[in-house]
Image (cartoon, rainbow, N blue to C red):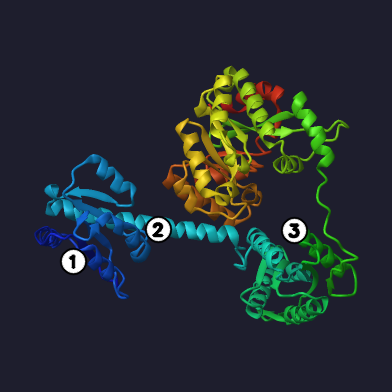
Amino acid sequence: MRNGKNEIFALIVDDDDVDRERLARMLEHCPRPIHVTEAASQSEALDLIRRPASHFDIVFLDFGLEDGDGRDLVPTIHGEVDPDCPIVAVTGFTDELIAAASIKSGMTEFLTKRSLSPERVAASVEEGIAWRKYRQDLRRAEEELTHRSLHDPLTDLPNRTLLVDRLGQSCARAKRSGDPFAVVMIDLDHFKEINDNFGHAAGDAVLIAIARRLRANLREVDTVARLGGDEFALLLQNISTHEAARTMAAKLNDLIEQPIVHEGHMLHVGCSMGFALCPLFGFSPAGLLSVADDAMYQAKRGLDKAVVAQSGGLRAAAPFDRTGMLVELEEALGERTLQWHWQPKIDLRDGRVLGFEALVRWRDPRGNAIPADHLIHAIEQSPLLEDFTYLSLETVLGQFSALRDDLGEAAISVNISASMLERSGFVSKVAECIERAGVDPARVTLELTETALIANPSQAKRVIEQLHERRIGLSIDDFGAGFTAFGYLREFAISEIKIDRSYIRRFTESRFDQSLVSSLVVLCESLGIPLVAEGVEDAHTQDILVSLGCHAGQGYGICRPIPYEDVPLWIRGWKRDHLLTAA
């Protein structure tokens, strides 16, 4: 529809003049006015589609054209007309397999020429236009959610997630071609006094003004991000020397120190800046951010408003030393001394236990508890990954089987590294572990971070489909923590999405985070995917989540991860204190 009118533009592609005229007459009986364009061949249809002023709301397509198969036009229609343009097959074929293949190829409906009637054609038009509107609304919602997940809600600048992604790209480019750049951390001075003396509205006005100035005065190739509070970060391309960095620091300082007028008040802020140059400090995003952050705090403590890190002074943090730990970890795998703690997932409405997530824990031979993120990172980068993965599955599924009488209908989730999706025989080995444990596959879920889908989507899709065929669930963990790609959710047989705890942490105070969860609820409902909130810390958060339609959650406010041996006792206590009360 265009120009505000309720007119529909339809294209009929059929090489039979009689059939084409018959369908055009039927379209005249539709409740809404329809402008019909006809094409008698594939080449004529392509010419019409590719005309600059062409516009079609719906396409009726025959298969057997003189110069080719009409189905070959489907990708072109979706690529050059509209990705959501409804395509109705109108053909003499009646084979059900052909009909199924047509729908799978991207057509929205399959009609045989024998079954055509004005009523059926009118219904196809209305259904097609409604389908297109649904797809467009869903696409807009996905785009909005993607934007929200990657941008600061106050200033609309990139947030930390998007900054780290762009920083990773800059590091890779610098390593490949030597293109230099600078990472800059900026902390505003006197910002707290403005908040205290003039209120948070004035503080927000300052942040918005600073964001606009930075964005307006830097190049398109540069990145301006807000990390939270009064902290900003910049990626400045082609800054290669300390002299260039100091020159840029002076310009940035002048820009930030310009007064800001808010409700009749003249507000003044300063700043402290830290610069880290790449490749001087290597190609690690975390290392460069750390160096720039240290330089910024050095500026705060000294007289200089900006500090450019020197190679002989501030240095990137040394990577976590894994060599000795891996030797000890290999022994722990052989001796089976790793432990798994279980954290429950509940229905926030009535307290029913929906399942548990098994989380690995390990103390080295000296009794030191190894942080879980260090442990997992070390394993993922080592030859121990496969042994660890299958030991995890074997142990946790054995524990789950032993507790089946206490667990009711609860399920079990096990975290899997993204790189396991590329290992030969992964799905069959997972199925074997489940079968040996005597567990119903439908009660087993593997958890992957969303970056696993984005890194190698075609391979991930194949593996997920194989898991789905075996009734094994797949959960997307920490959703929203990485470079979120909502389009993949429609493509994969996902059985659960877990919202990253960062969106829940300030949930009761942040309308942005609440609106994001609300949008995710709508999206997941439309896709039939259950949504789980991670990091639920208190009853107020639970109440808001339930009111928004998110009915499942886990977090310290419900229960911390507990040793497997304590799970039966916890279940009995939970049922006594919560389910009986709810009843």
Q: Quadrant of residue 193?
A: bottom right
Q: Which residue is more in the foreground, 382 or 306?
A: 382
Q: Which residue is more in the foreground, 107 or 41?
A: 41
Neighbour tally class for label 2: few under 14, some 14-19, many 20 plus, Cα within 10 Å: few
What is the spatial separation of the Cα atoms under label 3 and label 2, in whole angstroms?
39 Å
What is the spatial separation of the Cα atoms under label 2 and label 1, in whole angstroms?
29 Å
Determine whether label 2 and label 1 are within 8 Å by CB.
no
SS at badge 2: helix
Name the kind of residue labelled 3 in the image: Ser
> Is tag 1's residue or tag 3's residue first in the polypeptide sequence?
1
Q: Quadrant of residue 166?
A: bottom right
Neighbour tally class for label 3: few under 14, some 14-19, many 20 plus, Cα within 10 Å: some
Q: Which mark is residue 137?
A: 2
Residue drawn at x 84%, y 68% as measured from the top left: 309
Q: Position of residue 106 (x, y in %)?
A: 33, 52
Q: Is residue 262 above or below residue 49?
A: below
Instruction: Look at discs 3 and 2 and give the one toward the viewer.
Output: 3
Q: Position of residue 431 (x, y in %)?
A: 54, 27
Q: Quadrant of residue 395?
A: top right
Q: Is residue 407 left or right of residue 49?
A: right
The residue identified by callout 1 is: 38
Name the kind of residue labelled 1 in the image: Glu
Q: Which residue is more in the foreground, 233 or 13?
A: 13
SS at badge 1: strand
Determine whether label 1 and label 3 are within 8 Å by CB.
no
Q: Is residue 132 left or right of residue 560?
A: left
Q: Is residue 514 left or right of residue 4?
A: right
Q: Is residue 402 above or below residue 289?
A: above
The residue identified by callout 3 is: 284
SS at badge 3: loop
